[in-house]
Amino acid sequence: MPTCRLLRLEVSDAGDGCPEIQRPAAEDTHGRGLQIVDALTHNWGVSPRPGGIGKTVWADLKAPELVPVPRTREAAAVTVTKGQSVRVGEQWRAVRSVATERYATGGLAVVLGLDEGPPLRLPAATALAVRGWDEVREAER
């Protein structure tokens, strides 16, 4: 059975008053926003903003199996570290080891040992799509 988590959306303004669900006539061109919010969300409400100016209208949506997608960055191969993942073709591969070596012409190569397949040997400046950047940097602190 899938687990549900809540995704909260918030909109703030500096206006006075508290929004209320309207019951507009069929020909009215406004007044349906909170009806839509009420119909589509698990729960919603209004909270005062810190500092006492305005309000925040919030709504919780049920999000089955909500899992944050790791942030992807483009980075030079020479900056990739063990524990990150790189995109190889259409697949993401975990980096198990990182080494450098010199080409016969003198340029620097990066050799990435991956969780599957042969090592990936690239010029150091090659741009790669990388995930896990923030997690690895946080662990280094």
Image (spheres, rainbow, N blue to C red):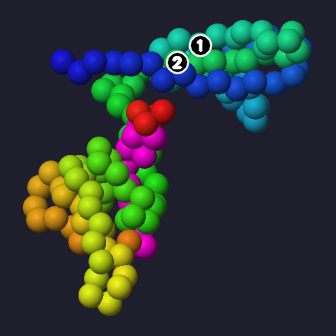
Give the label on residue 44, or none: 1
What's the residue at 30%, 26% (across, down)?
65
Q: Quadrant of residue 86?
A: bottom left
> Secondary structure beneath disc 1?
strand
Is 133 a magenta residue?
A: yes
Depth order, front residue of 61/91: 91
Q: Quadrant of the N terminus?
A: top left
Q: Is residue 57 left or right of residue 65?
A: right
Q: Is residue 86 left or right of residue 25?
A: left
Depth order, front residue of 6/88: 88
What's the residue at 54%, 22% (across, down)?
8
> Mark 1 belongs to which amino acid?
Trp
User: Sequence-wise, which precedes: disc 2 or disc 1?
Assistant: 1
Please tell me how crowded label 2 is: few (under 14), some (14-19), or many (20+) other residues with Cα within 10 Å: some
What's the residue at 21%, 49% (across, down)?
96
- Magenta region: 125-137
Q: Quadrant of residue 67?
A: top left
Say whether marks 2 and 1 touch (CB < 8 Å).
yes
Instruction: Specify whether residue 43 is in view.
Output: yes
